[in-house]
Amino acid sequence: MAKSEVKVLGAWSSPFAMRPIIALNIKSVEYECVQEEVGCKSEFLLKMNPVHKKIPVLIHGDKLVCESLIIVEYIDEVWSSAAPSILPSHPYDRAIARFWADFVDDEFYIAMRESSIAVGAEAKQAAIEQMVDGLALLEDAYVKCSKGKPFFGGNQIGYLDIALGCFLGWLRVTERFNEMKLLDEAKTPGLVKWAERFCADPAVKDVMPETDELVEVANVIAKLRAAPAPK
Amino acid sequence: MAKSEVKVLGAWSSPFAMRPIIALNIKSVEYECVQEEVGCKSEFLLKMNPVHKKIPVLIHGDKLVCESLIIVEYIDEVWSSAAPSILPSHPYDRAIARFWADFVDDEFYIAMRESSIAVGAEAKQAAIEQMVDGLALLEDAYVKCSKGKPFFGGNQIGYLDIALGCFLGWLRVTERFNEMKLLDEAKTPGLVKWAERFCADPAVKDVMPETDELVEVANVIAKLRAAPAPK
């Protein structure tokens, strides 16, 4: 497919926008990135995703697909003949991958966001503890899903690897702001090694932002949040 | 498969627990229902779904699957040879069905729940308006997805029909408590007819609770909520 027929409307610092890009890289599909600016929603985005007004949006010819995990499944299904498969092949393994991917979005990400916006030390500490508990569960899931192989998905990056892996950049930002290790050899030995492999993978390494760059974005977002609303 | 090999841990009044049951009915799979009591989590549930501690759980032989929409996809994939298919066959139609199913859970259901627990007339009114806006979007989605056929999924009940349809009982409860019509001929003509067809479908009609029964459950839940926490 010609490059211009596949576009990802995203932002380089967005973990959610990283998901379709990694999936397209895995499938060796060429695409164009259309970057949204942090803190401002373009007319184009409002037109492409009028319901949620959020990145990412996959533009595939005349088709629009929204919501990052739905886009990943779409990519896996459309380019099904392009190995490797992103979803596991067995229905039960697929259900387990979907379960933990939802956990990442509904619990782990929410705790990570809360840790950055919570007001007061107690609320921030509670969010951090929720992240730690979440990572302990994900460590356990990693051991069970990977069955001794390098990734949640086995020998290749799969659906749950993408779902969780896209947060590694922001996890490091959270670690830096809170002067602590969230992924560590003692509590999450499997995830520590997995994170190294994930970030070094050819489908990921040029997509994963540097921690310093994300810290800059975090500071911009904090300023926007603190600024008075426009009159 | 023997009946005892497929169990649904649920509750007759739960819209989420209704989803796997409708899916199993569509696939003509025999199952046993294990009922949880409203307002109390059994030891069995805590063991079956230790992460979220929520119904429904599908127990399929030695496999446990949690999260209602994930269970529906699992059922569709495991009993793939049992027609009809629950997910649409084309990847784009699947993505659209998944998008609106997520919308139902993340926006519509949240607004419905908020309308019942919101404190103060203003907050309650805001939640009701959010439901009305959501139903307008879903009416539009129905017209586009069904393409003139009876269901979102075409001629048969499909994934999005199950996702939205399971809330019809509680929608009627919300209408009764607020003395208003949320589904009406003027604003949502397609959904009005769709709801009638959905509730009359053989896979649904013995599963959809009566409004009077759900009102009783709503009153029990309200009393539990108002009761002081146990010491």
Image: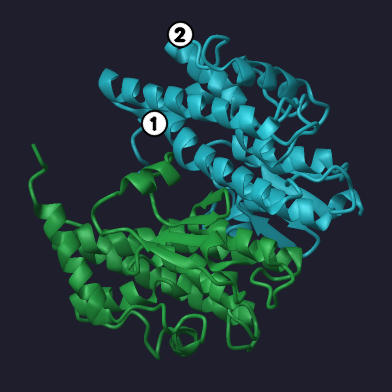
Chain colours: A green, B cyan
Q: Secondary structure at mark 2?
A: loop
Question: What numbered label is drawn on residue A212?
Answer: none
Tell if the residue under mark 1 belongs to the same chain as the one under mark 2: yes
- Percent x, y for residue B185? 58, 10
Q: Secondary structure at mark 1?
A: helix
Which quarter of the figure is the N terminus of chain B placed in? bottom right
Q: Residue at x 45, y 38 (%)?
A: B107
> Residue at point 19% right, 75% down?
A177
Q: Which residue is mark 1?
A: B114
Quadrant (top left, top right, bottom left, bottom right) of the C terminus of chain B? top left
**Would you place residue A188 above or below residue B156 in this image?**
below
- Answer yes or no: is residue A137 visible: no
Asked whether, in this view, residue A25 is left or right of residue B56, the answer is: left
* Amino acid type, callout 1: Glu
Q: Quick check: A231 left or right of A117?
A: left
* C-alpha span from label 1 to label 2: 17 Å
Q: Position of residue A192 (x, y in %)?
A: 43, 87
Residue at (37% x, 29% y) in the render: B117
Amino acid found under the numbered disc labelled 2: Glu
Is B14 or B72 nearer to us in this picture?
Answer: B72
Q: Which residue is mark 2?
A: B179
Provide residue A178's location: percent of width, then percent of height. Answer: 20, 75
Figure label count: 2
Work out whether mark 1 precedes mark 2 in sequence or the reverse, and give the earlier one. Answer: 1
Name the chain letter of the residue that bears numbered label 1: B
- Neighbour class for label 2 at 10 Å: few (<14), some, many (≥20)? few
Q: Residues within 10 Å of mark 1 (few under 14, many from 20)?
A: some
Q: Chain of mark 2?
A: B
Quarter of the image where one finds residue A26: bottom right
Percent position (x, y) of residue B118? 33, 28
Left or right side of B109 for B92: right
